[in-house]
Image (cartoon, helix red, strand yellow):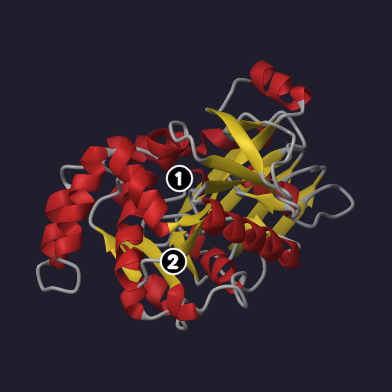
Amino acid sequence: MKLYAVIMAGGVGSRFWPRSKKKLPKQLLKIFGDQTMIQATVNRLSGLVEKENIYVITNELQRSEVINQLTDIPAENIIEEPFGRNTAACIGLASIIINAKDPHAVTVVLPADHIIKDEDKFSQVLENAANYANESKGLVTIGITPTRPETGYGYIQINDNPIKENIYKVYTFAEKPNYATAVRFVESGDFLWNSGMFIWRTDVILDEIKNLMPDLYEGLATIEKSLNSKRFKEELKSVYAQLKKISIDYGIMEKSSKVFLTKASFNWSDVGSWEEVYQLSEKNENGNAMIGNVYTKMVGDSYIYSPEKVTAVIGLDNVIVINHHDTLLICRRDKAQDVREIVDYLKMNNMDEYL
């Protein structure tokens, strides 16, 4: 069994404005430590997946920076989507490319922008899931045991009796719930957070796309004929223009009878907002996490980022302040999810220089 990896890296990270911009989004930033998020994702696979078997799906704006940051990954493995068409198309495209190279490939699919600690445990979970996916022809997803009634994640319900070591049959997928529903999910004990990480045989996921998403499969078959030809880029653009935006969860995982879950035994965060960054950051005695030239007085439980300019905050608690280049964000921590609305506003008003 040879293991491959697909890293999905085409997002814009709108909830990380103003640091996350179209050309340099969240996954290409150093949010924690000396590595960008995508570099950390690739390095996490060390010893499990050979560098030449790692593929990154990104877009035209970001491809050159991805190549600059991932010097150990062959440039031809950095695949450029002509348009964003959500995760089903992204995974389908990567799958036909890998399948052409190795019809027996087992593939790990990972977002580029997660934080994972306990990397040895992460490797063990992936290895166990890959072995099961290879033997069973199942689609395996990684579930995270919830620590709070989070409304920003999807949930997965399982039969809590394992069919094999740390492998569970999936009952249902649930979209991001309201708070009351999230409380009910957590209290039930058989719902886990949906991490968006998957393990499967490439031929199996392509068969499921053929059965459950025939329009996408037809498009992928057309693209496949042009692989390694001069027509590839043109054909890819032509097919992608006609594809619908559908997630792999909605298109495949919620409908397939072959879906299993393995529980994460490692600390995980999708770092989905500035609030998550605050929670994961080191804090001083007042509960403040601060980066850069910052002065505070009577400030508590806040995240303040200002590496270039002097930023002073007085008499505020539970706020996020991001002072970055020519943009400034100030918001309450409990409103961090609403930052994406700023990006929508800037788009609607053609203020592209701030995106």
x and y percent of residue 321 in the render? 62, 47
Q: Residue furthest front?
A: 135
The three-letter amino acid code for the residue at tag 1 is Ser
Towards the viewer: 62 or 192 = 192
Q: Is residue 273 above or below residue 159?
A: below
Left or right of residue 283: residue 138 = left
x and y percent of residue 322 in the render? 58, 51
x and y percent of residue 123 in the render? 67, 65
Q: Secondary structure at mark 2?
A: loop
For disc 2, the neighbor class at 10 Å (few under 14, some 14 to 19, many from 20) is many
- Residue at the disc numbered 1: 14
Q: Residue at x 59, y 69 (%)?
A: 40
Q: Residue at x 62, y 69 (%)?
A: 44
Residue 103, by quadrant, is bottom left
Q: First in sequence: mark 2 or mark 1?
A: 1
Q: Is residue 109 visible?
A: yes
Towards the viewer: 240 or 94 = 94
- Residue at the disc numbered 2: 105
Q: Secondary structure at mark 1?
A: helix
Residue 143, by quadrant, is top right
Left or right of residue 133: residue 190 = right
Left or right of residue 70: residue 209 = left
Left or right of residue 168: residue 355 = left
The three-letter amino acid code for the residue at tag 2 is Ala
x and y percent of residue 27 in the render? 50, 60
Question: Viewer-nearest of labels 2 and 1?
Answer: 2
Question: Which disc number belongs to residue 180?
Answer: none
